[in-house]
Each structure stands twice: as structure tokens, then as C-alpha cells.
Image (tube, helix red, strand yellow):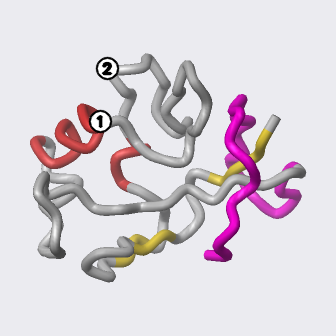
Amino acid sequence: MRWTDTQEPTTCRRCNMHWEDGDPALTIACTGCGAPADEPCRRSSGGNERVCACRDEAAVQMGLLTRCEGLTWDGRHEKPLLLRERPIAHALMCRSVRTGAPVSRWPS
């Protein structure tokens, strides 16, 4: 079990765009994996630290995200979701994440 706060600030590693309230794509449900709004995408093989491509595309179509201006072939932002070993006491909307992925190596 890993823990994350989907509303904590995040920054694209490619273009440095910053979202103070978390990844805008996570505010809508994912049609790819079925994750509801405000919960991370669910990977059957583990590794929930990335949003499904269809969720990112839906966020772009809804005007919640713009295409990444960084060096990327698909126009997607690289928005890491920090996974932790323990629940986050200060977070308003903590979500448990079942994943085989290890705790994030890189601090936010």
C-alpha cells in the first residue's frame, strides 16, 4: 500500500509548468482505468505514479491542461505523483494507492 495526496503541488519535469493545487487531470475521472476524480490512475501491473494518457488528453480537451512545450513527442507533461510509505496526516484528500511501485526516490 502506498499513499499520496493528489492535491499537493506538482511541476512538469519537461517544461517546469507548475500547478499549485495538484495535477489538473486528476480532477476528472479516467476513462482508461476507471479511477474516479481526485484519485490516481490504477495500473494493473503496479506503478500508479503516472496519469493515463487518455486522462491527460481529456484534460487538454476540457481546457484544464495545455500541451507541454518541452521536448516531448506526445505533448504530455511529465507530472510525477509522489508515493509514500505512510498516510499523509496534513493532506485534506489522501488517497490510498495499491501499487507494486516503490516509494518515490525523488523528493518533490
The N terminus lies in which quarter of the figure? top right
Q: Look at mark 2 in the image and give the residue it sits on.
A: 31
Task: Determine if the magenta segment contains residue 49.
Answer: no
What range is drawn magenta here?
Answer: 87-108
- The residue nearer to you, when weighing 93 against 50, is 50
Q: CA distance from mark 1 to mark 2?
A: 7 Å
Depicted 60 relative to depicted 7: above or below: above
Q: Residue at x 37, y 77 (%)?
A: 18
Depicted 35 relative to depicted 57: above or below: above
Q: Residue at x 46, y 46 (%)?
A: 50
Labels 1 & 2 near each other (Cβ < 8 A) = yes
Amino acid type assigned to the residue bearing label 1 in the image: Arg
Q: Position of residue 67 (x, y in %)?
A: 12, 61
Q: Look at mark 1 in the image and give the residue it sits on.
A: 55
Left or right placement of residue 54 versus residue 11 in this view: left
Amino acid type assigned to the residue bearing label 2 in the image: Thr
- The residue nearer to you, when weighing 55 against 43, is 43
Could you say whether the residue bearing mark 2 is in a helix, strand or loop?
Answer: loop
Task: Determine if the magenta segment contains residue 100.
Answer: yes
